[in-house]
Amino acid sequence: MGKLPARHAVLGILMSMVLGATIIALILMVVQNQTVDRPLGPKYGIVIDAGSTHTALFLYRWPAGKENNTAIVSQVGLCDVDGPGISSYGLDPPRAGQSLVKCLRDLKQAIPAGQWGATPVYLGATAGMRLLKLQNATQADEVMKEVSKAIQRYPFDFRGARILSGVAEGAYGWITINYLLEGFVKFSFQGKWLHPVGNNILGALDMGGASTQITFVPAGPVQDPQTAADFRLYGFNYRVYTHSYLCYGKEQAMKQLQVQLHTVNFSQNISHPCYHTGFRLNLTLGDLYNSPCVKKPTSFDPAANVTFYGSSDPEKCSQLVQRLFNFSGCTFSPSCSFNGIYQPPVNGNFFAFSAYFYTFNFLGLVPQASLSRVNSTIDSFCRRNWTSVKTAYPSEKDKYLQDYCGSAVYMKALLLDGFNFTQNWNSISFQKKAGDADIGWTLGYMLNLTNLIPSEPLAPVTGVEHGQWAAGIFFIVFVMILSILVLFILSVRNTAN
């Protein structure tokens, strides 16, 4: 008889365990039901960067049901369109749309068929189309219509083709960099979203073919409201300085140098100090003066030819480049860049991308190099003759190779003298990617238009991941079954005794 109370005690304990396990299982089921639904499969988005010299399609992916949670969007595809930028098709707009077909087809194959209709597609045209709009608004409108028609032939959620302002281009590039590098918010090991401590917000230096942008958070207030952009991201307010210089992208700057030389010397053969000795470039005057970025002579024969021949003179090249900038006439002096544009002192660290990266990468100066090394490398390269340069870089196309000297001299002058990085050169990193994503305005543009960046702080992460929840429930159910089995065995033995 003495064993019966002990058995009753064991039965009581086991019954308590079963009851406790049941309560825990119910709590876990309630928590799981309160978490955000997680549809099967990821979501996709496409942004088409219609630049002045080329077009590229970027494919992004993020977990479905995860909008407004950061650090989740990844670049999973990139397709470079063959041929020039869409702005070059002003005289034949249908070809602008046709140029996109191959890349649209390729990205369609990269997205599951069930996701096609839910995939937003945006096209943003930049400085090349801004220039065409100034030059011939009708042609610009026709080009945008044709690219829109081409995209609409595919089963995506097309959300429009737009010509971006320079301010928007600069601001979206700034958002992209700081989003990818967790400058706005980061996820802690404790399951919380935290605002990074200290000055971790990076500035953005973008160099395109027709324009260049500088965007950063200044140490003090922005005095000129026309150069300010305000954002509220993850509960924090940001006022950034941003300005876009139309006609100061790489291609248009190189054209300005040619026109400067031709304006001084109207002869048919002109020495060009930024070209290598032995290099010759033949142009018609129609091609030379085909941009609104240069002032045309009162009268000239568009079919007439001009030949530029290189002289490998970096000092004269630098002097020529300096004449691109006007350092007088700024209302906000001394807080100025050039051409009368207000700019507060540069602040923090910067990423320089697009043509900045390609030029400095070619010269072996990425991601960072001392100013003395930059000076010596550019000087040495610019003094070489065309034969030695061609021999050293046989796979490089002439249209790129011919301009590396001039573009390097120009970009260095722009950064040092134009943007006033003389005392802050070491704050610049020349980068193409952040993580696995290309740096540029496209990701920031998509994040903004798809509301993937919230204005208010993110809530702490709660709930249990599906795999952990399933494992927990399995364990609890196993314990319950085992407990019931033990109870049954003890009951049988008790009855037998």
Image (cartoon, rainbow, N blue to C red):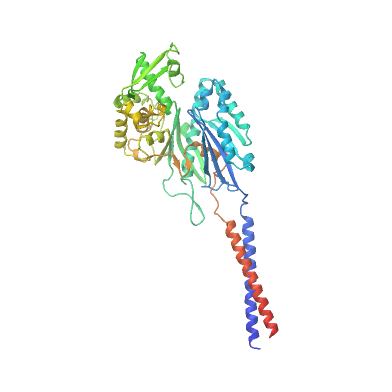
Q: Image quadrant for the C terminus? A: bottom right
Query: Whole-percent x and y of residue 88?
Result: 51, 24
Q: Position of 372 compared to 57: left or right?
A: left
Q: Position of 225 compared to 151: left or right?
A: left
Give above or below for 490 relative to 140.
below
Q: Image quadrant for the N terminus? A: bottom right
Query: Whole-percent x and y of residue 246?
Result: 45, 27
Outermost residue toward the bottom in this view: 1
Give above or below for 80 relative to 198.
above
Q: Quadrant of residue 389?
A: top left
Q: Nearer the viewer, residue 472 or 371?
A: 472
Q: Nearer the viewer, residue 348 or 366?
A: 366
Q: How many marks?
A: 0
Q: Nearer the viewer, residue 379 or 162?
A: 379
Give above or below for 72 relative to 107.
below
Q: Quadrant of residue 256?
A: top left
Residue 311, can we see it?
yes
Residue 450, can we see it?
no
Query: Whole-percent x and y of residue 401?
Result: 38, 29
Residue at 58% over, 24% down: 94
Query: Whole-percent x and y of residue 61?
Result: 55, 43
